[in-house]
Amino acid sequence: MKSLVLAASLATALQITHKRVTLPSGQRLEWLTCIPAARPFAPPPKDVVCVHGTFHGAWCWEPWLERFASEHGVKAHALSLRGTSASPCEEKAVKLSTHARDLTEAIEAELGANARPALVAHSFGGPVALDAVATGLDVEAVALLCSVPPSGNKPGTFGVDTLRRRS
């Protein structure tokens, strides 16, 4: 009986698809997707796009994509920003505005021009997501997880000195 249950659960295991999205600039970005199992009589699943932080890529979201899809019934996506190992580029440095434009263009290419995904952004992904929204990306919601502040990671951005001055 246990082997039958295990076989059934493996048959319904969610899969993460890996692909490359080509942007209008010609830049190619890695795009991961995990689609939830069909649920009878449920509304169509919403899209959630995850944006990684510095020194990471879409790979860091893989366990979360499966969890978002299986437990919350959303279509979960993640992309690797330009200049990461999965989305290499010629530039030695990439501006925040370029990452924001790439995010918007990747969402439009993969989800359609009228898509309104929720964004989940970690660390440096926070300013990227906020800049994309500020420049026109229409989203359902934005969740910032340990985000870099909009002012950047400059010395003294926030720390003991900041706390002392506010006291």
Image: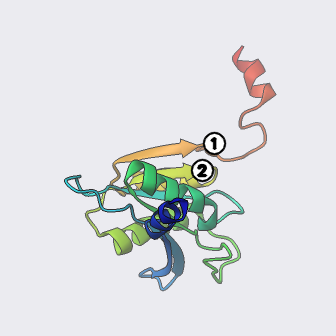
Q: Where does the image place residue 15, in percent across and percent down from the top left?
A: 48, 70
To which residue does mark 1 refer? Answer: 146
To which residue does mark 2 refer? Answer: 122
| Local SS, label 2 | strand
Q: Where does the image place residue 115, in percent across and percent down from the top left?
A: 29, 61
- Residue for point 30% across, 56% down: 45
Near-viewer residue (113 or 50): 50
Mark 1 touches mark 2? (CB < 8 Å): yes
Query: Mark 1 to mark 2: distance in Å?
Result: 6 Å
| Local SS, label 1 | loop
Q: Where does the image place residue 118, in percent across and percent down from the top left?
A: 39, 51
Residue 101 in view in this figure: no
- Residue for point 71% across, 47% down: 153
Residue 61 position by quadrant: bottom right
Identify whether 143 is placed above or below 54. Answer: above
Describe residue 54's horizontal placement relative to residue 67 as left or right. right
Identify whether 158 is placed above or below 26. Answer: above
Amino acid type assigned to the residue bearing label 1 in the image: Cys
> Which circle marks residue 78 in the picture?
none
